Amino acid sequence: MIDRYTVQTPCMASQRQSTMKKILLLLICTLSLSACYQEEVIDIDQRVVEPPADTIDQYIQKNFIDQYGVAVRYKYVDRYVDPTKRVAPPSREVVQPMLDFLLSYWAGPFINVPNGEAFFKTHVPAEIIFVGSSIYNSDGTEILGTADAGARITLTRVNRIDESDQEWLFLQLGTIYHEFAHIVHQRYNLPPNFQQISPQGYTSAGSWYSLSDDEALRRGFVSPYATSSFNEDFAEVVAHLLYVPDFYEKYINQEPDCTDQACVERNVGRALIQEKVTAILKHYKQYTGVDLLEVRALVQQKYE
């Protein structure tokens, strides 16, 4: 009868110990290599981002994102526009000229005045949205642009870009300066007593478009839209001050030798606008360090 119980001899024990040492050593090396590979993976810099391949995207990256921290959205994305509105996206060929337009007429005049660069970089919104067409409300009024809580500005009519067309030029300048001004009052409120300068002149909601320019002036406003609210009044004064060439002739300087009531009322309105301009200039200087009259001078030079 053969006992299946085996006996370990000294020679067999020595061989097994040697084998176990080899296995243990191999296991240690394997674990060491595994640990090294893990460390190499962890050390990869995840912040490295490939530059955009599209030439327009490269231009935006260099001149807007890297320079000012603002992204420009020119490809249609429905979340950027009210879903109840019908719009057309900008054509690709107008995007580059529109980008240059913003750098020339918006960024340039601000960053080239004392304290202007710091102001612009601090207050510029995170996003600019290009819409190729106009956008209309249900009542037929046109939405020229929007500013969303200081984070986004939307510009319309981009497909019609033509700097030689004064109507298009002033529309765009009025929109971008107006919406940019909203960011200032959203952060620093309105100037003290601004709401008391022409309190009786504001219109009820939705009725501003029934006023003429002359009627708005007699009330103490630079435009009918300015009568729609205190905030819109502030933004309209800033925008008109910057881009309207004959701003002082139209809105500030008194008409001499008035012989009718309408003339007298226009002069009263101009005096009210002068109060608003004075308050706004002081407000900007106090909170941003920027002299808007110096910005205006650089904008006006572009018309010469």
Image: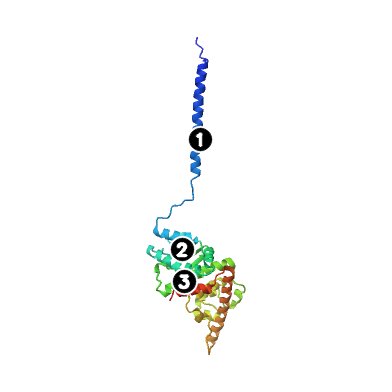
Which sits earlier in the primary sequence, circle 1 or circle 3? 1
Q: Nearer the viewer, mark 3 or mark 2?
A: 3
**Which residue is label 3 attached to?**
173
Which sits earlier in the primary sequence, circle 2 or circle 1? 1
Three-letter amino acid code of the residue under disc 3: Leu
Kindly state the secondary structure of the residue where label 1 is placed: helix
In percent of the image, x 50 and y 70: which residue is there? Answer: 177
Give how far across and how far down residue 199 sits, in percent.
59, 76
Instruction: Return the mark for residue 129.
Output: 2
Give how far across and how far down residue 82 sits, in percent.
48, 63
Above or below, 221 against 32 in this view is below
Three-letter amino acid code of the residue under disc 1: Ser
Kindly state the secondary structure of the residue where label 3 is placed: helix
Which sits earlier in the primary sequence, circle 3 or circle 2? 2
Instruction: Return the mark for residue 246.
Output: none
Q: Quadrant of the C terminus?
A: bottom left
User: Is residue 82 something that shows in the picture?
Assistant: no
Disc 1 crowd rating (10 Å Cα; few below 14, some 14-19, many 20+) is few
Give how far across and how far down residue 214 sits, in percent.
50, 81
